[in-house]
Image (cartoon, rainbow, N blue to C red):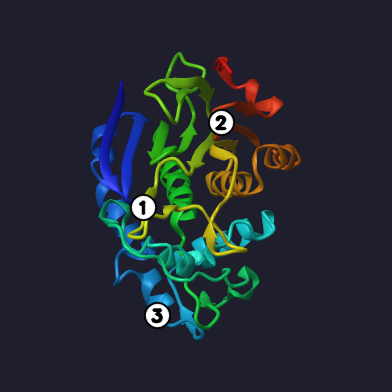
Amino acid sequence: MIASTTFRAMGCQVEIKLYAVGADAILSEMPARFDALENQLSRFRPQSELMQLNARAGEWVTVSAVLFENIHMAKHMARLTDGLFNPLVLPALIASGYDRSFEQICSRPVTASQPANDWRSIELNIKKSQVRLPANSAIDLGGSAKGWTAQHIADHLADHGACLVNIGGDIVVNGAPEGLPGWQINIADPDIDLDLAAVWLRDTAIVTSGIDYRRWTTADGQQRHHIINPRTGEPAMTDVLTATIIHPHAPTAEAYAKAVLLKGCRTGLDWLNSRWQAAGLVVQQDRAVVATTNFVSYFQERFTQ
């Protein structure tokens, strides 16, 4: 039997499935585990470890192993994407009006935004587990923390049996339920309540990111969304509505999805083709669907353009 649980965490719906003996008892521990991680990683909890670090930008700060690993990972993701993924976008997000969890955003004027600080200016001391952020900066781990958490929880559950962890569209699967080739994952159409395709996956991650979901209108009528171009500090101007990435490592899939969104469909997918073990599917703003050749190999049912 596959046991499952759903709850709210990290600003989104979490779904976890586990095929194992004693699965219900194991899954009952998950909400508390997520709550503990949010106390370390959330920018929406003023007393979180992350926000305490942000408050001391410019100083060396000793941090927990969890926060250090997430910041180290975020720097690596920035390196892989030549800075298109940049954890130092928090001031730009706040300037755009995204200064609280999304369900609490209300219409308000935006303020002038600036490009994000250079991600290379984040300093790490691995031996002492210390971090120094550049002065007058702040980190938002956001999507990368979701990807890291999905990977972290799935790797833990894999010790018990086949599992699926879905944190608001960041999905990690390990193993497969008995008699199945993997876990069936449906890729949603961003406009209608139908699926573009279904894929069978095991021992990998699939992440969807887009400008279709977290959108709001400011008090002066501007349309904004949460995908910030770190080079301008403004919401991304792109022909991509959603980008879905398959990769063995969920945080890397998160970073690649952001990079494809910022690069645009054709340039982004061409770039993705050069990335190790990455496959991608894009829904453009004109609703055309484009995928890398290797993505098609995952399809259970081909999408219709």
Does the rendering let one see residue 22? no
Spot occupied by residue 137 in the image (x, y as percentages of width and height)? 50, 76
- What amino acid is labelled 2 in the image? Asp
Residue of label 1: 217
Which badge, 1 or 2, comes first in the chain's sequence? 1
Whichever of labels 3 and 1 marks the residue nearer the N terminus, that label is 3
Residue 302 location, quadrant:
top right
Q: Earlier in the sequence, mark 3 or mark 2?
A: 3
In space, the residues marked 1 and 2 are separated at their CA atoms by 21 Å
Residue 8 at x, y = what percent?
Answer: 26, 45
Q: Which residue is mark 3?
A: 55
Quadrant the C terminus occupies: top right
Q: Residue at x 39, y 24 (%)?
A: 192
**Residues at marks 1 and 2 touching, judged by CB atoms closer than 8 Å:** no
Q: Is residue 279 above or below residue 225?
A: above
Choose top left, top right, bottom left or bottom right for residue 27: top left
Foreground residue among 57 and 125? 57
Q: Is residue 62 above or below residue 154?
A: below
Residue 178: where, in percent of width, then height?
43, 18
Badge 2 is on which residue? 286
